[in-house]
Image (cartoon, rainbow, N blue to C red):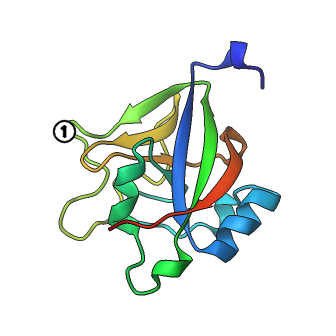
Amino acid sequence: MSCNECVNELTMYHITTKYNAIKILESGFDVNLSKRGAFGKGINLTTDIFNLCNYYNKTNEDDNYIVVCKVKFLKKMFNTSGPEKMNDGYTTKPKFENPPEGYDALYGSGPEIYVIPNSEQVNPLYIAKIKFY
């Protein structure tokens, strides 16, 4: 996919363990391995590196790594920050299993999170150890 075809290309971040970060860098993301989280099944990413502190493993601080990625969007992102929230707010059950037709990502603010259901959109560039104080 060339950049001329892209609606948008963003640098995004994903936090995980060292083992998973290395596997992602070597083989790319595999959406089939992602667990269905509070925002549905897909690759959870953010453009705000400080948002990762919400997912930081305080129990094993030496095993927090970020995967820095370029993410390409051919279609619009479905903004779930308005009346349609990403989850129901009570049980964190996802309201969307996948983005609605015509969209290739779910987006929510506060804290900012993107759910990308197609691993072909996400190109891992490098990994880095991260520590929040």
Residue pictured at 40% horizontal, 58% vertical: 52
Look at the image and tell me in which quarter the N terminus lies: top right
Tell me the kind of residue under disc 1.
Pro
Residue drawn 75% across and 58% down? Answer: 25
Q: Is residue 38 visible?
A: no
Q: Is residue 97 above or below residue 74?
A: below
User: Quick one: label 1, few (<14), some, or many (20+) residues within 10 Å?
Assistant: few
Spot the residue most to the bottom: 59
Q: Is residue 82 visible?
A: yes
Q: Looking at the image, which residue is at 52% across and 71% down?
A: 64
Spot occupied by residue 121 in the image (x, y as percentages of width and height): 67, 39
x and y percent of residue 70 in the render? 63, 38
Compared to 92, does 124 lie above or below? above
Residue 106 placement: quadrant: top left
- From the image, tell me which residue sits under label 1: 83
Tell me the quarter of the image containing the C terminus.
Answer: bottom left
